[in-house]
Image: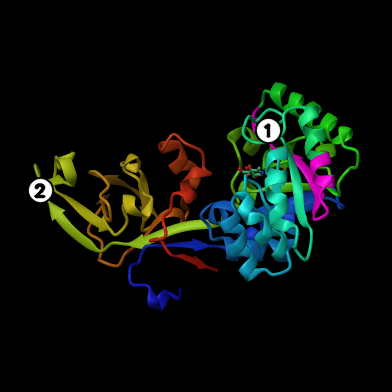
Amino acid sequence: MTEEQYFRPTKAIIDLEAIRQNVRHLKAHIQPNVRIIAVVKANAYGHGDVAVAGAALEAGATMLAVATADEALHIRKHYPHVGILVLGATPVHFAPYAAAQRITLTVFSTEWIEAAAPYVKAAAQPLQLHIKVDSGMGRIGVRTLQELRAVEEAITAQRNMEIDGIFTHFATADEEDASLFTKQVQIFTSFVDALAVRPPCVHASNTAAALIKDQKLQFDAVRYGISLYGLAPSSYVASMDPFELQPALSLQTELVHVKQIEVGDSVGYGATFVATESCWIGTLPIGYADGMIRKLGGQEVLIDGQRMPLVGRICMDQCMVLLTKKYPVGEPVQLIGKQGTEQVTLDEWAARLQTINYEVPCNFTNRIPRFYK
Ligand SMILES: Cc1ncc(COP(=O)(O)O)c(C=O)c1O
């Protein structure tokens, strides 16, 4: 989409140079022989999967990871040759598509392998698989050595399936208390050692583990997600960050209406804001249908380099801001990002929403176009 084809001033700007810069720093941080798997699931955490994948690959990532079969097919259209790993569970009938398009799937049950086998019997190339170990996350994966061996044997018995990797996911790598993390490391290491053949790609670390834990846990590859986008997984990791991450996303709009209201006049559904003095109110063309949910009421935005609060309830498509003075229609409004010396961060939104920064850009709907610089 070009800016000319889009008529609403609300847009997200994704700084691809920030993404490249983050990847360069993240690469310098790991051992030289360790590969970077760029996690671009959920439309690259809401940033736009195709553009982010391109920037990450240019800067040193060598493989991409997504959550679903459909995300993998979308990426494959744009990147015909790069390795793509689907991290989640996949329906067996996707197996022939995965084999044909060289998409690597995650497996953790003999039932899946046996059910998928007929689908890939006639495939021109073997289906590549990574075995998932549930070492403590409690989500998907083999949980016992017996299950692991059965999965390994079931795959090895299939002519058209290959074990390319084994991996696990840490539940608490971003927290100070390392007890579960240490247990997960022990379990995963013992599972890798129990395989009859060590596959070429052993991986475990997400951003937090790769940034602050022992380098040995980088194995053959690390899976960087949130850090690609310039965000830290938690305040604990942020406090130990070995380098500064550069946030890639900013969100902006413009004032579409400005008016003066008088004492007793109210603003928005439920009339929750009532003027106690004469004041200027601006209207912004963004609302909860864009992902700016009602819980963000009271959040400050940047206008003319100053913080000004949203007032009244956020509507589906619009919200209102209390201005410090009269501003013209068309005045730029920064919802996330920098204006002058002020900055509103995704972390600030996450704190107001009592959630994590991961969730915030994932919630921006398709109605907000992403533009790239
Ligand atoms: C299996 C798996 N690996 C890696 C990641 C990336 O984690 P992070 O974004 O914390 O780097 C995720 C993200 O949720 C994941 O689910």
Alpha carbon separation for disc pair 1 and 2: 53 Å
Q: Give the range drawn in magenta.
A: 153-175
Residue 299 screen position, x and y as percent: 35, 43
Q: Examine the rendering and report whether any part of residue 245 can be seen.
A: no
Residue 196 placement (x, y as % from top left) = 91, 38
Dot 2 amino acid type: Glu
Q: How crowded is mark 2: few (under 14 residues within 10 Å), some or many (20 or more)?
A: few
Which residue is identified by label 2?
262
On the picture, is 326 further left or further right than 246? left
* Residue in the picture at 24% in, 57% down: 283
**Mark closest to the chain's N terminus, 1 or 2:** 1
As drawn, the label of residue 52 is none
**Residue at image coords 68%, 59%:** 96
Amino acid type at circle 1 is Ala
Q: What element carries label 1?
A: loop
- Horizontal placement of 1 versus 191: left or right? left
Can you say whether 233 is above or below 229 in the image?
above
Q: Residue 173 carries which label?
A: 1
Magenta run includes residue 265: no
**Which residue is painted at 60% across and 55% down in the image?**
69
Closer to the camera: disc 1 or disc 2?
1
Q: Helix, strand, or loop for circle 2?
A: loop
Residue 69 to residue 125: above or below: above
Q: Which of 267 and 221 is in front in this view?
A: 221
| Ligand 1, image quadrant it occupies | top right
**Could you say which is closer to the camera, residue 331 or residue 1?**
1
Between 225 and 78, which is closer to the camera in this rendering? 78
Residue in front for this viewpoint, 62 or 275 = 62
Is residue 165 inside the magenta stretch?
yes
Tell whether circle 1 marks a residue whose Cβ is less than 8 angstroms from ligand 1: yes
Quadrant of the image containing the C terminus: bottom right
